[in-house]
Image (cartoon, helix red, strand yellow):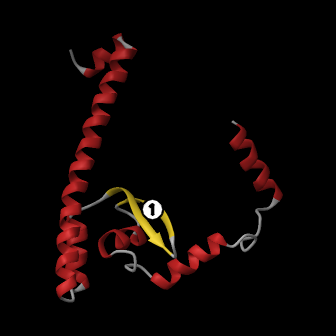
Amino acid sequence: MGKDRVRKTSGIAVRETARIDDNKRLAGIAGRNSATQDRIDSYRADAASRTVPRMELESLIRDTPWFGMVPCRAAGVDFVMLHANDDIVARDWLWIGADGCEPDMVRRWVVWCRTPGLVPAPAEPVAEIVAEIAEQ
């Protein structure tokens, strides 16, 4: 019985098939992330004893993608960045560490986030739209 036939005959079977497919994808991502973490650990150990050329790092990054949350800490604040192998800041944080991507700028960003009133409140129409969405 193929997928098309299952879809026509049973909504429950379709949901179960989708759940199995999702679990397989998640397991694949977890496996690739685990392999990538091993490469990151090796890279950091290597970088501690020598200056690694940026092109060498770029090659490692290209060959070992990461999809998921990147734990971060800056200026005494813990946070995460979602990285779908598409964010240079999260990528450098993951591979190089806390000071991997513009450390002074990241520390300023944390201070700005902690400072009430530094960022002006959104215009009224935007605030109303956000409030309506939040109520739904």
Residue 65 x %, y %: 26, 61
Front residue of 94/74: it is: 74
Farthest bottom residue in view: 51
Q: Which residue is mark 1?
A: 81
Residue 134 x %, y %: 69, 43
> What residue is at 16 percent from the left and 80 percent from the top?
46
The number of callouts visible is 1
Left or right? Give the position of 45 relative to 85: left
Quadrant of image for the C terminus: top right
Amino acid carrying label 1: it is Met
Residue 70 x %, y %: 38, 61
Front residue of 26/6: it is: 26
**Residue 113 appears in which quarter of the rendering?**
bottom right
Left or right? Give the position of 28 relative to 116: left
Farthest top residue in view: 9
Quadrant of image for the N terminus: top left
**Residue 88 appears in which quarter of the rendering?**
bottom left
**Residue 50 appears in which quarter of the rendering?**
bottom left
Front residue of 121/113: it is: 113
**Vertical comparison of 105 with 32: above or below:** below
* Crowd class of label 1 (few under 14; some 14 to 19; many from 20; radius 10 Å): some
> What residue is at 45 percent from the left and 82 percent from the top?
102
> What residue is at 37 percent from the left and 72 percent from the top?
93
Residue 133 x %, y %: 69, 43
| Dot 1: element | strand
> What residue is at 20 percent from the left and 71 percent from the top?
60
